[in-house]
Every structure is written in C-alpha cells, then in structure tokens.
C-alpha cells in the first residue's frame, strides 16, 4: 500500500470525525469528553477540558446560548442533553480551581485592542496566553458593560464577571476604560495606535465607524469592511471584529467569543509573517459526518432540575450527562471480535499496517494483527462508508509474502492441510458410475469430506438419483487457504489445476456444497457454470433417509460469512429446515452473520482471536445452532456449543445419535476421513482398489493429550514420524528419572518433539510439542 492508498482508506473511516455537538459549537468544545468526565464524577477534569476551549468559563457557563444542543443527536431519542446546565454546574462547583499561565516568548509584540466586549477580551486573552503585551481600550466605564446591562444578576452573577476579568488581568492585560479611540490625531487616534503597536484589533459594537475613514476602508453602510474569514481590513496592521466582523444583529455570547478568537488567530499569524488562511478551517457552519446508531439507544427524557433557578445539583448533572451516548461510530469494532481484541478501528489499523509494511529493519509487530483478520466482510457490511478491513489485511498479507516477511508459523499448517486435501491421498475426479460424461460435477469441498464423509457419499448418491445426464464427483480444494494466506502464486496454481480438471470432465455445471467454494469459484473463475447445492435440494424431494424432527425442535441458524449476500441460499436452507420439522430462530440475520473463527485462517495465526470470534457468536443465542458449513459446525462444537449441520438431518447416521452432540473430529481425523472417503468411494462405486498402508508404528494418545495436540496443531502423523525416526535411527534421549524417550524430527519448517515409552500395544505418548519457523543458513 502506498501513502496515497493509505490516505484514501483513512479518509473513509469516520470514527475520528467530531460529534455533532462539537461541530455546532463555534468554539469546538470537546463536549463528548467533557460529559464522559462528568459521568465519572470527575468534575475538575471536566472543567479543565471546558477551560481548554473557553476563555471566560464563569461567564459563559452562566449565559451560553448553547448551539451545541441544536446538534445533539440525543434529541432524536428523548431530547437533547442539556449541556449548558451541566456547564453551569461545573463552573459553580470547580471554578475556583482555575489556574492559567501565559507562554513566555523572547520578543513579545505590542497589540492594541479597541473594545472590551466579549469579542475584544477574547482576542486579548488568546494573544496574552501567547505571551504578547496587550492593551485594551474601552469607551465605557467598565469592561463587558453590555453583560451588566443585559443579564439579570440571578442569571449572570457579577461575581462571575469579576472572576473572569481577574484571570484576564492576571495575565498582564492592561484594560483602560473611558478611553474612546477616534480617527483623529492624538494618543487615542487610530493613526497613533497603528504607529505605536505591531497590530490593532477594532472589536467594535453596532453602529457606524465613519470616524476611521479614510485610514480604513468602510462598506456602504458605514461599517468597517472586514474579510469574513481572516478578519483583515484594508490596512495590513488592522483587523476588525465585533458587529463589524462576522456577528449578526442578534447578540450571541458564544459567537462573540468565537469572533474574537478568529481575529486573534489572524493577528498571531500576521505577527509571525505567515499566511492568514493557509491550512485554516472556514468560518462557515460545518456538519458532522460521524455515524451514530441512534436505534441502539432507548429514548430517555432530560433530567429536570429540582431547583429551576439554581440549576442542576452535582448528582443531577451526572444523571443528565449519562444521557449522552456518547456519539461514536465504531460499528465495525462493536461487531468484530478481531478489531475489539486489538482495541482499534479501521483508520488507526490501516496506519499501523502501513507502518508495519514500511519497516526496512526491525521488529514487525503488526504481522500477527494483519494475519488475525477473518476476512469475513462483516466490517464492510456494517460500515457506513463500506470500508473493508479484510481487503486491507489481504493486500498486506500479499505484500508480506512477496517481501519474504510472512511468518511461517502463521499459515504453514493450513497450507499443508490444503496440500493434503489436493494430494493423491485424498483428491480424485470421476464420472458417475455407468456414464462416460457428466452434465454436472459435484464439488463437496475438502472440509465437508473431512468433517462428515458419510454425508458426502449419501449426498452424491442422492444427486445422482435426482439429476439426469450424469453427475461427476470431484474431491479437491478450492484454494481458499492459499488465497487467504496471500500466496498469490500458489492460489493461481490451484485455480489453473481446477480449470484443467473441469475441462477434462467436459465442462459440466458445478454444484458446490460449501459457501466458501462457491465464493472462490465466483471470484476466480466467474465464467464457469455454477450453482449452490442448497437451492437444488430445496426444489427436489427430500432424501429417503431424511429425519423428520418432532414438533418443538428449535435451532438458531448460523449462516457462513462467505455467503452473507447469497439470498437464494438463505431462503433455500430455511425452507429445507422447515420441511424436516425444525423451528428456526434467527441470530443476526444472514447479511450480518459473523465468522466462525476459521475464515482468513485466523485460527492458525491467532487462536485467541479465533476463540473470541466463535465464543462471541456462540453466546448470541441459547438454542442449539444449525449450520450448513462444515467448518462453522465443527468450530462451534470445538468450543462446546451444541451445533448440527443441516446434512445431519437430511442424511442422518444409522445409530440415531443426537446430531447436535457430534464432536469436532479434530485435525488428524479430518485428514484420515478424507483419505478413507476416497478409498471407500473408489472401491464401492467405481470398483477400484486404492493401496492403503497400515501405519508402521501404533501410537497411543490420551484424550487430554489429544486436545493439547489439537491446540498446538500437532498431527498424529507427525508424532508417529518422530517415533519411527527415533526407533530406526537411534537418535533419541532417555530420561533416567521417568524412563521415557525424548526424540525430535524436523520436516521443512516444522520441528516436533515427542516424549514417549514403548509398550506391548504401541508407543505411549506422554507429551508432544513443536514449532514452525524458517531457519536461514548463512553460507
């Protein structure tokens, strides 16, 4: 991924976009974080956040006209959060803790500000905090005279005004009242101010400013002509604000403060010789594109203060703050156990993945994170902008393979299992007995053959009975493990082999039983005639062996993630389940189904994440689960969730066993099942014998040790090979204390150790452990 791709992907993730309350606040107060602190009862921290954006918290906390509440998304679910009332409580509870210290600079500039309203004093505050020397000139008897006249002391106490003015003067701001600036000569003339200061701000109230002409260009209505974005005037050292800037005729305290802040920003840029507008937000009203799932929250009305005059008590403020959602998207993180495990979201993850791929030397810490994604597509489904983390991770895996940085331990086992399913031991293709051509080719997939070989045989015979023209059988793998592992060359080799085999069979219509196989064929060979098994079965008579279930047999249906958009299959599967008497409960619906923990080979790269994925899914419903993907069913069974495959009812076992109690066969049995199925089918249907060799060594493994070997991805054949090598070569050690033998064998990147003892029945295995890594030999 190049930097441009990364930027485009990052831009599509909206999680870091500000919430609507912040966007509609001219001062961009971080309301979400502030209310989070209030919820926690941490009023000092909440007040500190408030003061980071508000120069006069005591004043604004009492008279803020709260445009933030107009944007509050809680308004759609009970009423907007009463943010202004919470601000007032913060001020009254913690205002005395406010301490501010101006920046120290080597050469402070001298700035004159005309007008001691909220706009002018805000500019004075911001510039004083940057270390400049500020003189404020006010014609009235007192600064902020308008606030004294317009607000009842019960609403805005004089003490609040005095407090904020005191904090301003403590910064060294010199406020001179009864100092009317004129356009004439003299120390209070505009020309003198311009000459004696590095910059001048005219933060004037309503009315004309004809006295300042011609030094400053005026508009037709007699007001100062001011650039609405930069607040610049016709004179390079003079800036304008107040009602001559961006303020409307209606008085707004928060807009006045914003007006002064905008002017102060321009003055600071001017003093530094920088562009007044480069990389600067527009003053135009903005909207938030942050997605918030309002439907996920109950409608809750605002908290009413017990004392309407005094406002919220601390407890009431906390209760009202708890109504804040708070606004976040994180739809993908909420749905995806992988993103939740890494405590991340796409924008952050994309950057981390890009950085990991860009490392020339050093530890690539995100390799495992990249390989822990199930590539299931759920994040893209729930994302408001359709951002697919699976595509990002898959591309990153391909780059890791191409650059030689893919850890062998992550996918080696899965790729070896794929090789076994494609080998002479397991794979073959034949026309239907008695036919020399095939109108159809049944492709059950390697995992169904490994999980339930009897069902594959029963299903194939059933298809041969209901379809005319010949139904061929192809036992092979669709190449999904190679595709998921980013092994492009290997996957292309698999696809090429499948195409040649299909052509050799006469180019029949392919029938797949596996949703992953269906999706892989569609993705890599879209020109092939293809159909899913399930709609075909739904339109045909039920198999003669199908088990009719008694009324009250309830299952929650799990759809495989690779078929989340196959609506025809979803309908067919539910129809079949109903036909055999099952009552179906939905979990999350087909399109929002989750992975079972096998997709993307996550169970091999990161078992912890894989278990979290399947456990999260298993916990969604209490009923037994019904699956129609072999790996989904086996993964649920592996984690103790009672689960059945739909074929368990269509082609039930002769012993009448509970289908939901069928255990996970395990990796060693899965391989043996495939091989035994091939031998049996060739023998029983085509009359062909396949030479089978009994194992040279019998190994005895307890249930506990087998479970441990499954967790460590150690196969019976690997253990058997270690014992055989040790006993024939004599390369083994004896533990004198236990009498056990310890031996090891390396095959490719796999090194296996085994502790065993020989008995009359065979080699009794006590422990097995190993690792997968590429060992480079320096020449």
Image: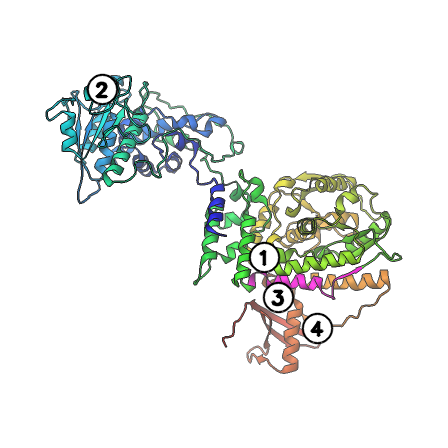
Mark 4, residue position: 698
Q: Nearer the viewer, mark 3 or mark 1?
A: 1
| Separation of residues labelled 1 and 4 (CA atoms) | 37 Å
**Badge 1 or badge 2: first in the primary sequence:** 2
Mark 3, residue position: 714
**Badge 3 or badge 4: first in the primary sequence:** 4
**Badge 2 or badge 3: first in the primary sequence:** 2
Q: Nearer the viewer, mark 1 or mark 4?
A: 1
On screen, residue 70 versus residue 542, left or right, reads: left
Label 2, secondary structure: give it.
Answer: loop
Q: Main secondary structure of the magenta part?
A: helix
Label 1, secondary structure: give it.
Answer: loop
- Coordinates of residue 653 in the picture (x, y in percent): 79, 53
Q: Nearer the viewer, mark 2 or mark 3?
A: 2
**Badge 1 or badge 4: first in the primary sequence:** 1
What are the residue bounds of the magenta stretch? Answer: 409-429
Residue at the outermost left position: 186
Taking depth in this image into account, of 721 and 271 the one nearest to the observer is: 271
Q: Quadrant of residue 754?
A: bottom right
Mark 2, residue position: 209
On screen, residue 522 versus residue 59, left or right, reads: right
| Separation of residues labelled 1 and 2 (CA atoms) | 71 Å
| Separation of residues labelled 4 and 2 (CA atoms) | 103 Å
Q: Which mark is residue 486?
A: 1
């Amino acid at each position: 991924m190049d930097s441009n791709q990364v930027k485009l992907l990052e831009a599509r993730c909206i999680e870091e976009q500000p919430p609507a309350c912040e966007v509609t606040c001219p001062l961009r107060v971080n309301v979400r974080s502030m209310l989070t602190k209030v919820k926690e009862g941490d009023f000092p921290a909440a007040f500190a956040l408030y003061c980071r954006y508000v120069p006069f918290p005591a004043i604004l906390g009492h008279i803020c006209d709260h445009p933030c509440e107009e944007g509050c998304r809680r308004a759609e679910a009970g009423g907007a959060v009463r943010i202004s009332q919470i601000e007032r409580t913060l001020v009254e509870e913690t205002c005395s803790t406010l301490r501010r210290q101006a920046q120290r600079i080597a050469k402070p500039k001298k700035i004159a500000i005309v007008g001691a309203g909220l706009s002018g004093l805000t500019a004075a505050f911001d510039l004083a905090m940057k270390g400049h020397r500020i003189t404020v000139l006010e014609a009235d008897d007192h600064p902020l005279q308008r606030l004294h006249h317009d607000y009842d002391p019960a609403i805005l106490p004089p003490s609040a005004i005095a407090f904020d003015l005191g904090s301003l003067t403590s910064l060294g701001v010199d406020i001179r009242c009864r100092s009317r600036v004129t356009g004439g000569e003299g120390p209070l003339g505009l020309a003198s101010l311009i000459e004696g200061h590095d910059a001048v701000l005219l933060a004037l109230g309503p009315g004309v400013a004809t006295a300042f002409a011609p030094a400053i260009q005026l508009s037709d209505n007699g007001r100062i002509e001011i650039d609405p974005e930069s607040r610049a005037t016709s004179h390079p050292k003079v800036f304008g604000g107040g009602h001559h800037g961006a303020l409307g005729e209606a008085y707004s305290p928060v807009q006045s403060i914003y007006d002064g802040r905008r002017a102060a920003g321009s003055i600071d840029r001017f003093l530094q010789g920088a562009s007044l507008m480069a990389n600067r937000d527009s003053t135009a009203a903005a909207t938030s594109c942050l997605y918030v799932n309002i439907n996920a929250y109950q409608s809750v009305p605002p908290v009413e203060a017990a004392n309407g005059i005094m406002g919220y008590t601390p407890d009431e403020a906390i209760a009202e703050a708890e109504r804040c959602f708070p606004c976040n998207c994180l739809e993908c993180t909420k749905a995806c156990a992988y993103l939740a495990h890494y405590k991340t979201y796409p924008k952050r993850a994309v950057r981390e993945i890009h950085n990991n791929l860009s490392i020339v030397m050093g530890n690539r810490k995100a390799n495992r994170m990249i390989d822990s994604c199930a590539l299931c597509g759920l994040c893209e489904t729930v994302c408001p902008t359709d951002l697919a983390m699976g595509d990002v991770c898959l591309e990153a895996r391909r780059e890791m393979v191409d650059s030689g940085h893919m850890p062998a331990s992550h996918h080696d086992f899965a790729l070896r299992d794929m090789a076994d399913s494609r080998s002479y031991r397991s794979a073959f293709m034949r026309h239907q007995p008695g036919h020399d051509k095939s109108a159809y080719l049944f492709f059950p997939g390697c995992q169904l053959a490994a999980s339930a070989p009897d069902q594959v045989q029963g299903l194939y015979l059933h298809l041969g009975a209901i379809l005319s023209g010949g139904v061929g059988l192809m036992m092979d793998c669709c190449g999904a493990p190679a595709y998921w592992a980013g092994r492009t060359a290997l996957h292309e080799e698999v696809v090429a082999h499948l195409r040649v085999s299909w052509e050799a069979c006469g180019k029949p219509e392919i029938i797949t039983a596996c949703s992953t196989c269906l999706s892989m064929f569609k993705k890599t060979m879209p020109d092939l005639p293809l159909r899913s098994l399930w709609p075909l079965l739904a339109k045909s008579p039920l198999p003669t062996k199908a088990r009719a279930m008694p009324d009250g047999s309830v299952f929650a249906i799990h759809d495989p993630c690779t078929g989340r958009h196959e609506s025809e299959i979803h309908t067919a599967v539910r129809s079949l389940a109903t036909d055999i008497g099952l009552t179906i409960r939905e979990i999350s619906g087909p399109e929002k189904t989750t992975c079972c923990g096998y997709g993307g080979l996550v169970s091999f790269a990161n078992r912890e994440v894989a278990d979290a994925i399947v456990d999260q899914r298993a916990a969604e419903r209490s009923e037994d689960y019904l699956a129609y993907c072999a790996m989904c069913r086996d993964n649920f069974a592996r984690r103790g969730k009672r689960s059945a495959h739909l074929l368990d009812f269509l082609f039930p076992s002769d012993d009448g066993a509970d289908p939901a109690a069928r255990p996970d066969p395990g990796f060693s049995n899965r391989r043996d099942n495939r091989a035994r199925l091939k031998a049996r089918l060739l023998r029983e249907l085509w009359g062909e014998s396949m030479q089978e060799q009994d194992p040279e060594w019998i190994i005895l493994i307890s249930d506990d040790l087998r479970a441990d070997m499954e967790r460590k991805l150690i196969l019976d054949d690997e253990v058997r090979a270690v014992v055989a090598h040790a006993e024939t070569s004599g390369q083994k050690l004896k533990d004198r204390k236990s009498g056990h033998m310890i031996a090891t064998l390396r095959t490719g990147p796999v090194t296996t150790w085994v502790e065993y003892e020989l008995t009359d029945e065979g080699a009794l295995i006590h422990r097995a452990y190993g690792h997968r890594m590429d060992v480079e030999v320096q020449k």
